Amino acid sequence: MHEIILCKLGEVVLKGLNRHSFEAKLMSNIRRRVTPFGRFRIYSRQSTIYVEPVEEGCDITAAYAACRQVFGVIAIARAMPCSKSVEAILENARTYLGDALRAAASFKVETRRADKSFPMGSIQVSQWVGGALQDAFPHLKVDVHHPELTVYVEIREDAAYVHAPPESAAGGLPVGMGGHAVSLLSGGIDSPVASYMIAKRGVQLEMVHFVSPPYTSQAARDKVLQLARELTPWTGRLAVHIIPFTEIQEEIRRSCPEDHFTLIMRRFMMRLADMLARELRCKALVTGENLGQVASQTMDALRVTGEVTDLPVLRPLIGMDKEEIVRLARRVGTFDTSILPYEDCCTVFTPRHPKTKPNPEEVREIESVLDVEGLCSRAMASREMIRIHP
Ligand code: ATP
Ligand code: MG
C-alpha cells in the first residue's frame, strides 16, 4: 500500500446545505493542483479529502506541498494505510513513525473508528497500540494531556491509516466559491498580499496591471507577471490583463495641475478596472490600499478614487501595519520579487506635493477637460491578456 495525503476541511464543513458544492469545488481545485505530480484518486469521507496515488512514480512530496496551499484545506497529513488489524496497525506505526517515536519523549495514541464493525472500540485500540509501542520504544512515556507526539490511527471501511499530527495548511475557502473579482496588481509589496487575502476567501481573481511604456520597462512588466506566477500556488491559474496607461498619464500631465496627478491617475485605474470587471462579470475590485500609507490613501483620497466605480472596492490591507504586510508577503512568497527595484507607473510623474485632502467637486472639474471616455476605451482596446499557470 502507498502513502496517501489527508486534507482536513476547514470552514467548508460549516456551510450546511452548501457543503456538497464546497467539497466538490475543493476536490476539483485539489485535483487540478496535483495533476502535474502523477495520477491520484481524490475522494472525501467525513470532513477529510483523500488524495491517493494510483500509479507508480507519483511525487507525493510535491503533491503534499501543493495541497497545503489550496484554500479550504485547514490541516494536512501524510498517512500510511495498512490492513485492518491491531497487529498491522502497530507494525505500521513502528516503521512509518519510527523516527518520530525515537525522537519524542512522550506520546499518546488517538484512534478514530469510522468503521463501526471493527471488533475493538477506539479507546481499546489506542490502549493496545500504545502499550505495544511503549514495549517497542521503552524510553517513551505515555502522556495523554501534553504528549510530544500523537500517533493517529484511523480505521475506515477500506483500510486503517496511521499518521503523525497534521500540519496547518492554507485555511480559507475554496477558490471559485466566492465569485469573481478584478484585482489591481502593481509591482509593489501590498497588492500581491491583498490578492492573496481575497483569494483566500474563495474569490477567483482576474488580475489587471497598468503599464506606461516607455516610462515603465519590460523588466517592470515581467516582475508583475512573476508576482502573478508566485500567487498561483494559492490562487490557481490566473489571467493577467495588461492595460496601456501611457496616453492617459501624458494627458493628465499635460492638462491637470500637478498636485492632482496621482489622484486622477488612480481614478482612471479604477474606471478601467471597473470596465474590465463588467466585461468579465466580476463583482468587486481589489486593491492593496492601506489607510494613511501614502497621500493617495487618506480617507478623502480613497473617497475620490473610489467614487468612479459603484462596485465594492475590497481593500483587505486597509488597517494593517507595513510590518504585518511584509510578514505576510514573505509567507505568501512574493516579497523578494516585490522589492526588486523596478519603476511602476505610479512612480512616474509623481507630484512633489500631492493633494492629501482632495475635494471631490474640484477633482471632477479638473478632470472635465479630459476626454475620459475616449482615453478609457482606447486603453481597453489595446489591452492584452497573459495566462499564468501554477
Ligand atoms: P503596492 O505595494 O500594491 O504597489 P502602494 O502602497 O505602492 O501599493 P499605490 O502605488 O498608491 O500603493 O497603489 C495603490 C494600489 O493601486 C495598489 O495596491 C494596487 O492595487 C493599485 N495599483 C497601483 N499601481 C498599479 C499598476 N501599475 N497596475 C495595477 N494596479 C496598480
Ligand atoms: Mg505601488
Image (cartoon, grey):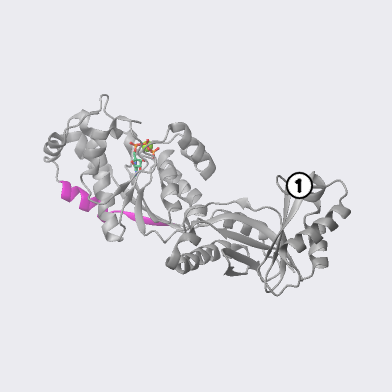
Compared to residue 98, the image places residue 31 above or below, namely below
Q: Quadrant of residue 133?
A: bottom right
- What percent of the width, then of the height, locates residue 347? 34, 33
User: Mark 1 highlights which residue?
Assistant: 143
Q: Which of 327 and 272 is in front in this view?
A: 327
Residue at position x 26%, y 38% from top? Answer: 302
Is residue 150 among the parts visible in the rendering? yes
The stretch drawn in magenta includes residue 283: no
In this view of the protein, which residue sits in the foreground, 332 or 221? 332
Q: Residue at coordinates 71% horizontally, 44% vertically from top-left?
A: 146
Question: Could you say whether the residue bearing mark 1 is in a helix, strand or loop?
Answer: loop
Residue in front for this viewpoint, 284 or 369: 284
The residue lying furthest to the top in this view is 353
**Residue 384: within the magenta?**
yes
Q: Quadrant of the N terminus?
A: bottom right
Q: Tell me which residue sits at (11%, 40%) in the image.
A: 369
Instruction: Give the x, y percent position of residue 62.
Output: 63, 57
Secondary structure predominantly adopted by residues drawn in magenta: helix
Q: Position of residue 38 (x, y in %)?
A: 63, 66
Q: Label 1 is placed on what type of residue?
A: Asp
Looking at mark 1, is its residue's CB closer than 8 Å to ligand 1? no
Q: What stretch is highlighted in magenta?
A: 372-387
Which quadrant of the picture is home to ligand 2? top left
Report x, y in % for residue 177: 41, 61
Q: Which of 64 and 120 is in front in this view?
A: 120
Left or right: where does residue 230 sit relative to residue 113? left
